[in-house]
Each structure stands twice: as C-alpha cells, then as structure tokens.
Image (cartoon, rainbow, N blue to C red):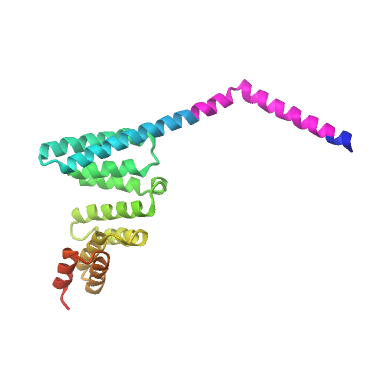
Amino acid sequence: MSKMWTDLLLQGALILVTIFMFLAMHDIPKKIFTKIRYRNRADYQAKRHFVLGAQLLAQARCSKSRSSTASLAQKAESEADKAIPLDPKDAASYILKALALDLQGFKTSALDSLDVALSPLASKSLTNKERGDALFKRAELMMSMNRRGSRVDSAIDDLTKAVELSGDNAKVFCLLGDCYKMKKMKAEARAAFEEALKVEPTSAVARAAIDRLGS
C-alpha cells in the first residue's frame, strides 16, 4: 500500500514538473504578469483622465462666460474620450462625456453616450443610486428633445426605474409628474408630485404643480 502511494506521489510530482516546464518554455508567467500590469496601468490612466475631465466639467458649469463654458466642456469631453478606450466597461466616463456634450448643446450625442453607459455591459460598474441618476439624466434629455410627445413613454420608463433604484430625488418625481401631465394622467401626476414633497417638503416646484392640477 505504501509503495502505491509513493508511486502516485512521484507521478504527481512529475506531472507538476512537466506543467511548470511547459509554462516556463512559453514564458506564460511573464505574459500573465505583463497583462495584469498593463490592465492596472490602463485603469490608472483611465481614472486620471476621468478625474481631470470631471474637474473641467465642474469649472465649465461654474463659468460665467459662454465661450469659456464651451471650451472647458469640450476639454472635459476630450478627457472622457481618452478614458473610454482604456476602460470601456466603466460607465462613468460615458456619463462624463454625455454631461459635457449636453453642456455644449449636443443633446443627441449626449443621449447616445448615456445609452452606452446604461447598456448591460457598462451599467454593471454603477451603484443603484448612480444608475438611477443616469436614468434621470437620460429622461431629462429625452424630454428636452421631445417633439409631439414621442419620447414621453420612454422617459416614464426611465424615471420609474430610477425611482425603484433610488427614490430620494425630488427632481425625479417632479419630472415624472410632468410626463404624466403631458399624457393627461392627472391622478398619476398628482401622486408623483406628492412623492416629491415627501422627499423634499420645501419643493416649490412640486407644490406649484399640485396647485395647478387643482382638486
């Protein structure tokens, strides 16, 4: 019995030696290390471009000069474009690009970028609150581009999902109320504005909307 175990151990050792020799001959450990090191470097570079882009976007929003706002927003978009190929599964860079494009007035392109951010591949990188915020922004963009009510249903879908993911944003409920008003759904609109007041009791927008709806 002991001889059998000895033979098995020797065979196992020989198999391990053969595997290690194969890996060493093909330089596989080095390739794996290089791949991991490259991925870490790419992630770092992507985050660096994202942070710089976010800073530029914040400056653009604070700027009182229209030309300065446009210039800073364009630079923010450029940083997002640099980050995306380095980490294409990170939704944050697509959202940054969408916000920069929207600030420049390119709403259709901004909507396209948000569509990618909320795609199954990229949206996994977002928390529930972040996904809810992105859905709200997409609905907001759709409503700003709405012609003949063609985008209202899509906006309602996004806002309903946003509420399910994170129901602590009064603006989401107010926009949802506006969408229901456009569809002549008075009861649903009132309920949405009342939810907005629960989240933010001092919301003048929600209070005024309820007053306009009447009894």
Residue 208 appears at what percent x and percent y?
14, 68
Q: Residue at x 27, y 68 (%)?
A: 198
Using residue 169 as the reference point, say whether residue 17 is left or right of it.
right
* Magenta segment boundaries in residue numbering: 6-35
Q: Quadrant of residue 17?
A: top right
Residue 104 in view (yes/no)? no
184 or 47: which is nearer to us? Answer: 47
69 or 85: which is nearer to us? Answer: 69
The quadrant in which the N terminus is found is top right
Residue 49 appears at what percent x and percent y?
31, 34
In the depicted structure, whether residue 130 falls above or below residue 94: below
131 or 58: which is nearer to us? Answer: 58
Q: Residue at x 63, y 25 (%)?
A: 23
In the depicted structure, whether residue 129 falls above or below residue 17: below
Residue 64 appears at what percent x and percent y?
10, 42
What secondary structure is the magenta-colored segment mainly?
helix
Q: Residue at x 20, y 36 (%)?
A: 74
111 or 198: which is nearer to us? Answer: 198
Q: How many marks?
A: 0
Using residue 86 as the reference point, say whether residue 199 is left or right of it.
left
The quadrant in which the C terminus is found is bottom left
